[in-house]
Image (spheres, rainbow, N blue to C red):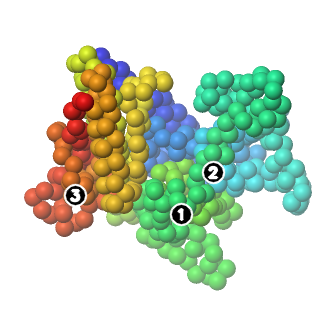
Amino acid sequence: MASDYSYILLVLPRLIITILSFLLDYTVHQVAAAWGSNPWKALVLLAMSPVTLVFYTRTISNAVEGVLFALLLLLILPIHSNSVSSTSKAKLHHFIGLVLTVGFFNRPTFLCFAFVPLIYWAIQSDRHKSYHSLTSVILNVMKTVPSALIFSVIFIVADTIYYTGHWPLSMDEKESIIEQLMKNTILTPINFLYYNINPENLAQHGVHPRITHLAVNGFMLFGLFHLYAMCSGINMIKTRKGIKCNSDRSHYEKSTPWQTSVLLMFYFVPLILLSFFNHQEPRFLIPLIVPLVLLVSHYNRTMTAHCVIVLFNVTGALFFGCLHQAGLIPGLFHIQQIVQSKSSSSNMSCHHTVLFTHTYMPPLYLLNLKKGQTSVDIIDLAGCTEDVLCQKLKDLHEELSLKNAQALGKSIHQLIVVFPGTITSVVESCGLAHKAQTMFTPHLSMEDPPKISNLLTDNFKSHLSLHVIEIDVDTTRV
């Protein structure tokens, strides 16, 4: 029954995100004509992308960020293309303020995506003027501030209640209102930024060269589309010199240089801003799929290009949807079964410590743990070194063995370690015996990818698996 409930917890949120992702289709269909794009051609490109098929059916904050980015592009649709009434147009700044607030509290990096659309909207608001001063643009942007402040307060109160269990004002007569607010208020975006500006925290998750998004992640997610965008950008820069960058003998259909340049800014400005962060994962770029398909739909493609795109999309969908981190969900279901079975099969209380290393921190809600429970501890060592991992395992083994010795038969402590097969030799070198091991195949962790030489051996299955082992903890009582 518990496993069925965990399955519902997995599928239901994904279904909600999938439904929300149709806002991308609606946005592309509505705004394509305004950007000189063919709506149906752009929709086909969007629908067949592995980014849409995989990432926009997953419960990650980047997918929510992408949906909000699409909604913002819909709201800043060029005025002459928008069929809504002038009254509705006058109230757009309230909706834009709402989207900015939701996006910022979801992921503060949303401001990187919203920057160019917001400036573009502020300029368009003064379409009746023959020129646009910096002051007028700033004043138009400031129109979104009142609604953004109102919704920010709502989110701050909601976060504070959720994480602390009480209102920001605890009604302590011994403290002033300012002291109570400073002590109790939870500012989620500030905590996000504070964590990510610490180089030591980013180093735990992986540090990448600044050019990773442009040179690697863009191609990994979008393939030939990213190449088209880069070539289009180079072409725009060199047009004055009469130099053109031809990619696959493609050319624009209906778009004007102005429309193309704006779409290029929608795509490249967020990518460049995100490149200032040392930690660069492909999923950070998935909101850019909408402006990219609008841009790429301008091109006519040869049959060879169509074949390359289809092959890339199939390969990308299989890689991200069926191979990359594929063992985490079944691994979590397995851990839940271990926890549930051992808790119900003995009169003693069971306490489990679960350590994850060299893999994404999985969605722990799938363990179906009750709020406030103390029977399961989760430890995330991220991409730690061999020495740190071994020392942590030995310390935990010693600590849990001591607790078992002092428990007087009333409770038992167990240790579970979850890691990709690429570091099996590292875990074995720590010298701790294990009484059970389960492998979940396939599983590929790009945090610690396997070497090609290892994949050519008879033991390749182990390197493409997620390992869940139960460490043998001493249960001798005193």
The amino acid on which the numbered mark 1 sits, given as a three-letter code, is Asn
Q: Where residue 332 sits in the image (x, y, percent)?
A: 32, 35
| Label 2: which secondary element | helix
The amino acid on which the numbered mark 3 sits, given as a three-letter code, is Ser
At label 3, counting other C-alpha atoms closer than 10 Å, the crowd grade (few under 14, some 14-19, many 20 or more) is: few
Looking at marks 3 and 2 on the same chain, the residue that comes earlier in the sequence is marked by: 2
Q: Nearer the viewer, mark 3 or mark 2?
A: 3
Image disc number at residue 323: none
Circles 3 and 2: CB atoms closer than 8 Å: no
Horizontal side of residue 308 vs 421, given as left or right: right
Residue wearing tag 2: 193
Q: Where residue 309 sits in the image (x, y, percent)?
A: 37, 58
Looking at marks 2 and 1 on the same chain, the residue that comes earlier in the sequence is marked by: 2
Q: Nearer the viewer, residue 238 or 180?
A: 180
The amino acid on which the numbered mark 2 sits, given as a three-letter code, is Leu
Quadrant hosting residue 369: top left
| Label 1: which secondary element | loop
Horizontal side of residue 60 vs 92, given as left or right: left
Residue wearing tag 1: 278
Residue wearing tag 3: 429
Q: Nearer the viewer, residue 359 or 27?
A: 359
Q: Residue at x 25, y 65 (%)?
A: 451
How far apart marks 3 and 2 lie (CA) works out to: 37 Å
At label 1, counting other C-alpha atoms closer than 10 Å, the crowd grade (few under 14, some 14-19, many 20 or more) is: some
Looking at marks 3 and 1 on the same chain, the residue that comes earlier in the sequence is marked by: 1
Q: Work out whether 320 lies above or below 220.
A: above
Q: Residue at x 71, y 24 (%)?
A: 167
